[in-house]
Amino acid sequence: MTICGILICERRDYMAKKETDYKRKFNEDNYDRIYVTAIKGKKEEYKALAEQNGMSLNAYIVHLLEAEQAKQKPPTD
């Protein structure tokens, strides 16, 4: 029984690693990474603000950037 239990755990670990590798590769192929640096303590403030608006911090930052970009685009006729 112990050997079987070890094999099950090893298989589970192997499958978890494959899933993680797949997600990492998917993200690498489909998304750009942007690193934001903020003053110590501000992250929690920004995160709370994002949550008040029903978004993750990442989604909130993207939302704000896209809104600003839309304001700056000239109107098309």
Image (spheres, rainbow, N blue to C red):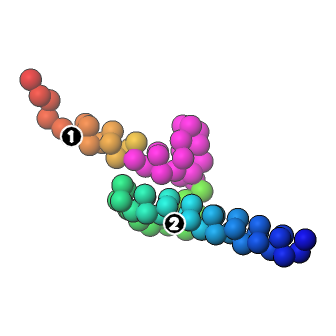
Q: In this view of the protein, can residue 17 be seen by the observer?
A: yes
Q: Nearer the viewer, residue 52 or 12?
A: 12
Q: Residues within 10 Å of mark 1 (few under 14, many from 20)?
A: few
- The residue most toward the left is 77
User: What's the amino acid at mark 1?
Assistant: Gln
Taking 51 as reference, is 31 above or below it? below
Taking 62 as reference, is 19 above or below it? below
Residue lying at 57% horizontally and 51% vertically, measured from the top left = 47
Q: Is label 1 in a helix, a strand or a loop?
A: helix
Circles 1 and 2: CB distance less than 8 Å? no
**Range drawn in magenta:** 45-62
Q: Residues within 10 Å of mark 2 (few under 14, many from 20)?
A: few
Residue 51: name its quadrant: top right
**Residue 2 percent coordinates (x, y):** 89, 75
Which residue in the structure is indicated by mark 2?
A: 21
**Closer to the N terminus: mark 1 or mark 2?**
2
Taking 12 as reference, is 50 above or below it? above
Residue lying at 84% horizontally and 70% vertically, measured from the top left = 5
Residue lying at 36% horizontally and 59% vertically, measured from the top left = 29
Locate residue 69 relative to residue 60 in the image: left or right: left
